[in-house]
Image (cartoon, rainbow, N blue to C red):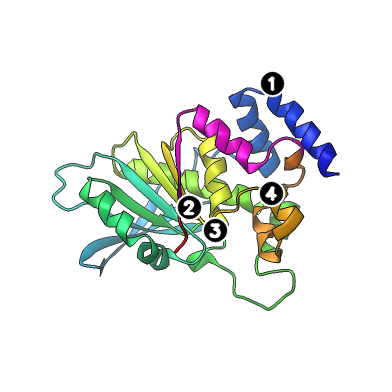
Amino acid sequence: MFDQTKEAREEFQSDCTYSELADKCSKLIGYEAADKIRGGISKGTFTWEGLKVEKHLINRDRGFFLPAYIIKPEKKESDKGPALIISGCFGKINELEINKQLVFQKLKKGFTVMVVDVTNTGELRTPETGRTGGYEFSIAKMAVYAGKTLLGYRTEDLVIAKNYLKSLITTDYIELLASEQTGPCAIHAAIIDTGFSKLYLRNSPHSWENLVKTHFTPDNIGIIVPCALKFYDLPDLVRNLFKSKVKIEVIPDI
C-alpha cells in the first residue's frame, strides 16, 4: 500500500504547480477561505514578565471566538512593523513561557507578538476523558462529518488570526511559530495563504508516512488528512515553501 501511495504521490508532485498543490491541500483538508470573518473584541490587559499583554477574542464564526494575547513592543511610535504569531496545544501562557527568549528578542526588534488558541487547544481544549481513542477523537470525528478535518479548522484559525492582527497593525511581514499538532496546520496555512513570511516549527510531526509506519498514537488523529498521501506528504509542502521563498526554521524542543 505504501508503495502505491508513494508512486501516486511522486507522479502528482512531478508536474503539479504551486497553485495546484495549494488547491489540492485546500480540498483535502476542507479549508474554507475566511475572508468574510472579521473583527474581534478587546477584553482588557494584564502584566506578564513586566510587559503589558492585551487580551482579545477573535471572531471565528457562529458566535465562536479564538482567545488571543497581543504584546506590542515598548516605545513604538506607530502601529507598523513586523509580527510573530505563536500557536501551540497547551495554552497561551505556556507558549509564552516556552518561547520567552524568542518573544523578548522579537519585541526588541520591533515585532508585535500574538499568541492564539486555535480549535481544541488552550482554553478551547476538550477535557481529557481517558478514552483509548485519544482526547481529540470526538472533535476530529465531528470535523469529518462536516466534510472537513480538524487540521483544516486549525489552518483556517491561523489565517483568521493573521487577518485580525493585520487589522490592528500595518505589516507585510508575519512570522508563524507552531508546535506539536499545530505544526502541520501552520505548514498548510503557509501553503494556502501567502501572508506568512517565515515558519518556526517546534516538536512538529515530520511526515505522515513516518507516523503511520512507526509512531502513530491516538492523539495524532487531529493531524490526519484522509487520502493526502496519494498527493503529498508534509516534507513535500516544506520543499515547496522553500521554493516560494518562505523561510523555515526548526526550533529544538525544550
Q: Disc 1 or 2, which lies upstream in sequence?
A: 1
| Residue 204 seen from this side | yes
The answer to whether residue 161 is above or below residue 8 is below
Q: Closer to the N terminus: mark 4 or mark 1?
A: 1
Instruction: Check residue 44 for magenta coloring.
Output: no
Q: Which residue is rendered at x = 39% and y = 45% of the image?
A: 164
Determine the residue positioned at 45% across, 34% down. Answer: 246
Q: Give the residue type at disc 1.
A: Asp
| Residue 15, numbered label | 1
Helix, strand or loop for disc 3: loop
Rendered-image quadrant of the C terminus: bottom left
Q: Say whether residue 233 is magenta.
A: yes
Residue located at (83% from left, 39% from top):
3
Q: CA distance from mark 1 to mark 2?
A: 30 Å
Please state the extent of the stretch shown in magenta in the rendering. Answer: 230-251
Q: Residues within 10 Å of mark 1 (few under 14, many from 20)?
A: few
Earlier residue among tags 4 and 3 = 3
Give 46 or 49, whichever is nearer the viewer: 49
Which residue is labeled 3 in the image? Answer: 180
Nearer the viewer's eye, disc 2 or disc 4? 4
Crowd around label 2: few <14 · some 14–19 · many ≥20 (10 Å): many
Residue carrying label 2: 178
> How far apart are labels 2 and 4 at the CA level?
17 Å
